[in-house]
Image (spheres, rainbow, N blue to C red):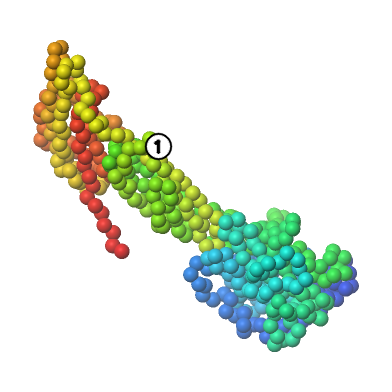
């Protein structure tokens, strides 16, 4: 602490800080060294176990008046001068707590310290908090050594500025008019305000930079970041969502598949609903034809310490099944047909021999005819032919046609441009243990 005090005095002298600010911060540094002895035991909890969804902050902020401010004793080069374990934590709802450490002024509390007096526009709680939707960091932190009237007293909203701080009350604003700290992808940037005036006539810390790049060669960037990020490079949640197939026959199904990174939970909306896992798949069944496609939307929230959210949507188009037998000739009776498949239920993704059996009654009337070579059996969703040319109007493929299905599939018996019959092969249901 003696070395830190000497360094602080030299630093302030070099920056031509007025004698009032110089004396105030020098006295504050001395007071902090005494105050630390009483705070060491109570702050040793800070780097311990975190609650569910809680992450720790790491890294450093910089103030020209006092130098580096450490947010976690586990960081390389941190904690040595404090001798205690400490960290600032971010809960799942963005609430901040715990303590940062300055070797020159001691503990800086991010707990609920009440609100500063005499400041207009304050309403509600002043506890520091990250808005998970916008990333804005709000509230007030407090340098504890500046608001202690004695070693045993607490630091509350009613605590007056201590004489050791030269009248500075220790409050540090994290957001205000024209400035503020913001968390983007788990990385902090922007400025907090520690009070004071540039000429030092009013004591305080001035601007505190949470993302500081030194002027050395090469320059070094130090910032405040969450353990979910692990560095000064922001991380954003990502999401992919797909539908297979994207066009289906009325009454059949499609499979929705999704995967995400850096997320904590997902919520479905649109044509489906409910909480979903961060990665998975789901079959959507009994899709009925309508004039507009079904739209499936998924929103995934960023993991604790990252915040924000990501949204993706896919559509599934449903085509109708013909309600009446189409005519394939100009006679008085249209062609009709039947199509059967066996088996009607198969295992997902397993190659299976499917037997197709069909019977076609040609149209009747003068001048009508129907050649089996103009008929085929095809996959309704993909439009691809399973049997491209029929050998007769009534037959069966006894040896079967190998098919590997990943979703419910409809097959059509088609002659020319007319669909005579449809048969559906379903998937064997798959159950997962709870």
Instruction: Give residue 199's position: percent from left, percent from top.
Output: 87, 65
Q: Is residue 306 left or right of residue 146?
A: left
Q: Residue at x 52, y 62 (%)?
A: 304
Instruction: Give residue 165's position: percent from left, percent from top.
Output: 80, 77
Q: Residue at x 81, y 68 (%)?
A: 196
- Quarter of the image where one finds residue 408: top left
Q: Is residue 332 above or below residue 132?
A: above
Nearest to the observer: residue 38 or residue 423: 423
Quadrant assignment for the C terminus? bottom left
Residue 234 visible in rendering: yes
Instruction: Give residue 354's position: percent from left, percent from top.
Output: 17, 39
Q: Is residue 370 above or below residue 325?
A: above
Label 1, residues with CA under 10 Å away: few <14, some 14-19, many ≥20? few
Nearest to the observer: residue 292 or residue 247: 292
Quadrant assignment for the N terminus? bottom right
Residue identified by numbered label 1: 292
Q: Is residue 56 left or right of residue 254?
A: right
């Amino acid at each position: 602490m003696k070395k830190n005090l000497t360094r602080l005095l030299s630093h302030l002298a070099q920056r031509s800080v007025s004698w009032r600010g110089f004396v105030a911060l020098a006295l504050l540094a001395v007071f902090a060294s005494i105050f630390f002895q009483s705070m060491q035991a109570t702050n040793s909890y800070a780097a311990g176990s975190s609650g569910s969804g809680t992450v720790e902050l790491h890294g450093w902020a910089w103030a020209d008046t006092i130098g580096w401010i450490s947010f976690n004793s586990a960081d390389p080069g941190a904690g040595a001068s404090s001798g205690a374990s400490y960290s600032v934590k971010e809960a799942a709802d963005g609430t901040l707590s715990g303590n940062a450490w300055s070797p020159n002024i001691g503990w800086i509390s991010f707990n609920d310290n009440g609100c500063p007096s005499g400041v207009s526009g304050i309403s509600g709680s002043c506890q520091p908090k990250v808005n998970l939707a916008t990333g804005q960091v709000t509230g007030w932190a407090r340098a504890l050594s500046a608001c202690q009237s004695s070693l045993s007293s607490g630091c509350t909203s009613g605590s007056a500025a201590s004489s050791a701080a030269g009248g500075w009350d220790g409050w540090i604003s994290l957001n205000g008019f024209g400035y503020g700290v913001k968390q983007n992808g788990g990385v902090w940037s922007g400025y907090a305000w520690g009070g004071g005036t540039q000429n030092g006539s009013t004591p305080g810390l001035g601007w505190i930079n949470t993302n500081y790049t030194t002027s050395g060669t090469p320059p070094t960037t130090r910032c405040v970041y969450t353990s979910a990020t692990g560095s000064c490079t922001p991380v954003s949640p990502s999401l992919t969502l797909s539908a297979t197939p994207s066009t289906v026959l009325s009454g059949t199904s499609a499979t929705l598949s999704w995967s995400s990174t850096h997320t904590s939970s997902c919520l479905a909306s649109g044509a489906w609903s409910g909480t979903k896992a961060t990665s998975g798949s789901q079959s959507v069944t009994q899709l009925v034809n309508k004039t507009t496609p079904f739209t499936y939307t998924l929103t995934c929230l960023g993991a604790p310490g990252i915040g924000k959210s990501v949204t993706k949507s896919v559509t599934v188009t449903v085509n109708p099944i013909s309600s009446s037998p189409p005519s394939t000739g100009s006679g008085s009776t249209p062609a009709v047909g039947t199509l059967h498949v066996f088996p009607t239920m198969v295992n997902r993704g397993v190659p299976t021999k499917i037997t197709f059996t069909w019977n076609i009654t040609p149209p009747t009337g003068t001048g009508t005819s129907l050649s089996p070579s103009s008929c085929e059996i095809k996959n309704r969703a993909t439009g691809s032919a399973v049997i491209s040319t029929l050998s007769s109007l009534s037959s069966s493929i006894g040896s079967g046609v190998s098919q590997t299905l990943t979703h419910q599939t409809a097959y059509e018996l088609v002659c020319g441009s007319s669909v005579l019959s449809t048969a559906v092969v379903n998937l064997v249901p798959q159950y997962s243990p709870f």
